[in-house]
Amino acid sequence: MEVLRDVVVLLHIVGFAVTFGAWVAEAAAGRFRTTRVMDYGLLVSLLTGLALAAPWPAGIELNYPKIGIKLVILLILGGLLGMGSARQRRTGDPVPRPLFFAVGALAFAAAAIAVLW
């Protein structure tokens, strides 16, 4: 059962890596757009994070402050990606740079919290 939990942890980190990697690719290309890949990485992070928030296997202690902080970051990140996607569809222009850089900072922060805390 611990191996399964470790696999879910790995997938959780991969979800944030996909989000951050897609962000880096867009920043390096100078496009400053949000992409569906960022959305999919966020979805993987959400689903695996919810699975990790369940107390399995029995006897495991959960770090509730970490779970709460990561959930808040995930919700803000989802909101920013949603706003960016809506703005891109409506105007066809790239997202504003502060919003774009906030997406990258939050994706990196969520991955850092997952690994370091």
Image (tube, rainbow, N blue to C red):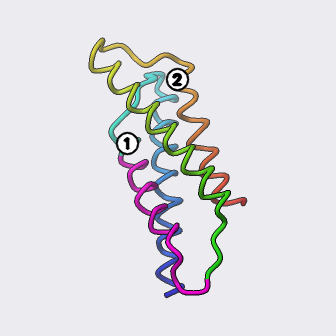
Residue furthest toward the left? 89
* Main secondary structure along the magenta-highlighted residues: helix
Give SS at disc 1: helix
Which one is earlier in the sequence, the residue at label 1 or at label 2?
1
Tell me residue 74's x, y (percent): 51, 45
On screen, residue 104 above or below 4: above
Amino acid type shown at disc 1: Asp
- CA gap, disc 1 and disc 2: 15 Å
Return the mark for residue 84: none
Tell me residue 66's x, y (percent): 66, 57
Q: Residue at x 36, y 34 (%)?
A: 35
Between residue 63 and residue 103, name the one nearer to us. Answer: 63
Between residue 30 and residue 68, name the one nearer to us. Answer: 68
Give SS at disc 2: helix
Q: Is residue 116 covered in magenta? A: no
Between residue 13 and residue 26, name the one nearer to us. Answer: 13
Q: Residue at x 47, y 71 (%)?
A: 8
Tell me residue 33's x, y (percent): 41, 25
In the image, which residues are magenta? 40-59
Q: Residues within 10 Å of mark 1 (few under 14, many from 20)?
A: many
On screen, residue 79 above or below 51: above
Give the side of residue 112 with respect to residue 78, left or right. Answer: right
Q: Residue at x 45, y 40 (%)?
A: 22
Amino acid type shown at disc 2: Leu
Tell me residue 48's x, y (percent): 44, 63
Q: Which residue is mark 1?
A: 39
Q: Which residue is mark 2?
A: 99
> Which of the 4 image quadrants contains residue 116?
bottom right
Give the side of residue 106 with respect to residue 54, left or right. Answer: right
